[in-house]
């Protein structure tokens, strides 16, 4: 395993807690690692995501090459990024901008940031390659949903 296999402590992810408490918490917190296809670019996320969603919009279909995108959000101070990356900015329907960060070698996006949501990092769920990852709670842009796709029964629907 390369550089992504090394876990370094986050810079003060538990504001307000003492050092000793923070160390104790780090041990019990879930740490997940997302990578690009070739593995050189990785994102390490500490703790549970604050939101997990799927988006069926056409821009997400184009970005992922799949029929919908699934992503999880973390506060940026719980996320650590390692490896070489290239950025691309997408302007959404309502004029908001998102910056996608992807591997210059294999092209896989491993995280993105949305202008309207400072301090939040979104990571494509597939980049964790973990079938036990928690399910999405919100489904967005269902008017673009492919006809054969079904969402989990209790998911929240957003326009
Ligand atoms: Zn790569
Ligand atoms: Zn979308």
Image: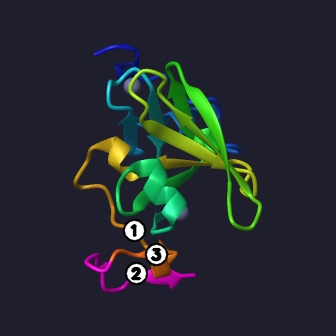
Residue 66: horizontal and vertical position, in percent? 35, 56
111 above or below 141? Answer: above
Count of numbered badges drawn on the protein: 3
- Viewed as shown, does residue 64 lie left or right of 132? right
The one of 117 and 77 positioned closer to us in this rendering = 117
The label on residue 76 is none
The residue stretch that appears in magenta? 147-159
The quadrant in which residue 107 appears is top left
Secondary structure of residue under mark 3:
helix
Q: CA distance from mark 3 to mark 2?
A: 17 Å
- Is residue 16 located in the magenta-colored stretch of the structure? no
Q: CA distance from mark 2 to mark 1?
A: 7 Å
Q: Nearer the viewer, mark 3 or mark 2?
A: 3
Q: Residue furthest left?
A: 131
On whether ligand 2 comes within 8 Å of the CB at mark 1, the answer is no
Q: Earlier in the sequence, mark 1 or mark 3?
A: 1
Residue under numbered circle 1: 136
Residue 102: horizontal and vertical position, in percent? 50, 33
Q: Residue at x 31, y 80 (%)?
A: 147
The reply to whether residue 49 is visible in this rendering is no
Secondary structure of residue under mark 1:
loop
Magenta stretch, overall SS: loop
Residue under numbered circle 3: 144
| Structural crowding at the residue carrying mark 2, measured as other residues with C-alpha within 10 Å and reported as few (<14), some (14–19) or many (≥20) | some
Q: CA distance from mark 1 to mark 3?
A: 17 Å
């Amino acid at each position: 395993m390369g550089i992504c296999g090394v876990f370094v402590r986050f810079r003060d992810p538990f504001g307000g807690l003492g050092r000793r408490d923070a160390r104790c918490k780090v041990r019990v917190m879930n740490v997940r690692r997302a990578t690009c296809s070739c593995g050189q670019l990785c994102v390490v996320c500490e703790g549970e995501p604050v939101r997990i969603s799927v988006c069926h919009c056409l821009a997400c279909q184009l970005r992922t090459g799949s029929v919908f995108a699934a992503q999880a959000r973390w506060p940026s101070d719980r996320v650590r990024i390692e490896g070489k990356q290239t950025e691309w900015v997408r302007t959404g329907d309502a004029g908001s901008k998102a910056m996608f960060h992807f591997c210059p070698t294999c092209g896989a996006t491993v995280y993105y940031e949305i202008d309207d949501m400072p301090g939040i990092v979104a990571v494509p769920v597939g980049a964790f390659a973990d079938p036990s990852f928690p399910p999405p709670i919100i489904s967005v842009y269902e008017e673009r949903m492919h006809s054969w796709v079904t969402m989990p029964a209790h998911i929240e629907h957003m326009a």
